[in-house]
Image (cartoon, rainbow, N blue to C red):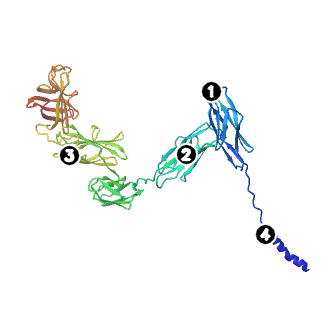
Amino acid sequence: MKKFFYFLLALPLVFAACGNEPEPEPQPVVKDPVLNVTETSLDFVAEGAEGTIHYSVENAVEGTEVEATCAAEWVSDLTVAENITFVVEANEGEARETSIVVAYGDLQKSVAVKQAAKGEEPKPNAPVLEAVTAEVEYDWNTTMGEVEFKLENPIEGVNVEAKSGAMWISQVQVKENKILFAMSENKGEAREGKITAQYGMLEPIEFTVKQGAYVAPDPVVTINEESVELAYDATEGSFTYTVENPVEGVVAEATTDAEWISNLAAADGTVSFTTSVNEGFVREATVTVTYGVASDTINVKQAAEGQNPDLNYYQYGIVTFEAQARTANVWDIIMSEQHPEMGQMFTRITVQLAEDNTGLIPTGEYSTEDGSILVNTSTANGYSTWRYNSSSADITICELYVENDLEAHTSYIEGMFQIGNDVYGFVFEGAVPGFMYEELGEEGVTNWTSFSSRYAFDDCYILSGNAEGFTIELYIHEMGVNKNNHGTSPAVGTYPLLNWMFSTSENYCEGANGGSKVNGIYLKSEGEVVIEEAAGGYTVTFNVVDSNGTAWKGTYTGAL
């Protein structure tokens, strides 16, 4: 019984001894060698040349070397080194072919060597890989790029492979004759990296990729509101703005040309300003916020007192402005505006004067209510109108205030007119084209800037004059004048305004049927032109009537 007990005590020791035996070490896996040869066939000219075969060995076996052999005597100097080189001797006969056998142990690869007959063009030889764009350069924020290569004499089944040596160049892929790649944005100094392309056992080629240094983008300032609309009695206003890509040390500024907006201040994304109470028509102004090279604008509009909520009010911005006399006491004001939303608009306001005035619309107030502004009627369709996008409409209500400064030769013209539910206001300041600021007096027009005479055709001279707000052309017909005997100016005498004559039977100034005109309006056959001798030249006096019924007179003394 004791022996059995002792036997049981001994069992754990036996098992423990067995458990301490070391496990056998894993044996390394031996891979079979692999022989790679890039070329499968090489072609040579009849004159002979040196040849190269590119090879590599994977899982090389110690003590085993690459060997190369060729049975043909015309292939010599067969040498195995980093590459296999040999010499093909000149061929004086027919085309010939042999093989070079590349061996590594039991492994063999055969490369065909072909040589053209004497005088025969050779076939393409070994492959050649070249860089077309060896270096490219991109901006700091360009994220996609490409380089181009050229591959000659490609081998079937062998592809160009490419890889990048820079962390910031990725996703390198070969497509046809280009290598495409991605780049991360450069946040630092200028940098460059390399892309390597490999074709079989050929020497790899490199491409240099450069990326410029980081350039901070220009700031952008954006006004958040589309517009600002104020009540007529508002004295303060504001709007907000944001700045992208801010620059240290640069601050926003706000400006405007409107006198009724003042104390502009831009800070912390808000522009504040003060306004005066509007005592006139609805008014608009542009406020510009500038931040460095960036800017944005906003339209500020202030209503008029008593503004009808059922009507739409607009400030009419003048693009062109002129005045034309229709008759001695009827004038047209013609103006246009390029509206930012509605486009080009044209307006004609016809003004009826209290008495004849051939120079300008006198200082005063005019309106449709008192009849001094004429509107279209069924019997007189051609007065105050408004046209927009080839559509026209009659002006129903219009008010006009004119103030002339004859010394400064300028005018202030303020007005409003209504088309349907739209009311437009406008202001013009400056010299009005078509106005004569000189008071004519008894002698009429005398403030000539130029006056001249020229021979036009047989029996006709043209007298041309220019004064402020005034142009005239007088066709003076003189009997017997032709190209052989004409002088520099018409003869002294009196020339009555008459209809054009086919053959001149008396001296006259051509009137009704064309020729003579004042401010572009043809003259009637009423009045006369008198030419007299004077010291230093001539005196020309005219007293005529245009086809609108406006009477014009004037005097010029000087050379013609």
Can residue 92 be seen in this snapshot? yes
Q: Residue 302: tell me if it is visible.
A: no
> Which of these two is toward me, 8 or 349?
8
Q: Image point 10% across, 38% down: which residue?
A: 442
- Residue 296, percent from left and from top: 37, 53
Q: Secondary structure at mark 3?
A: strand
Residue sticking out furthest to the bottom: 2
Disc on the earlier residue, 3 or 2: 2
The reply, left or right, for residue 481 in relation to residue 64 is: left
Look at the numbered disc 4 and give the secondary structure of its residue.
loop
Separation of marks 3 and 1 at Cα, in angstroms = 95 Å
Mark 2 vs mark 1, CA separation in Å = 36 Å
**Nearer-N-terminus badge (2/1):** 1
Q: Amino acid at mark 2?
A: Glu
Indicate left or right for 165 with 367 as reference: right
User: Of the residues under marks 3 and 4, which one precedes in the sequence?
Assistant: 4
Decide which of 357, 110 is in the foreground and name it: 110
Where 485 sits versus 433, above or below? Answer: above
Please state which amino acid type lies under the numbered disc 4: Asn
Q: Which residue is mark 2?
A: 206
Which residue bears the numbered disc 1? 120
Give whichever of discs 2 and 4 has the lower sequence position: 4
Disc 4: which residue: 20
Q: Position of residue 152 (x, y in %)?
A: 59, 37
- Of the two numbered discs 3 and 4 in the rendering, the one whose residue sits closer to the viewer: 4
Question: Which residue is under mark 3?
Answer: 410
Horizontal arrangement in the rendering, residue 455 relative to residue 275 (left or right): left
* Callout in the foreground (3, 2): 2
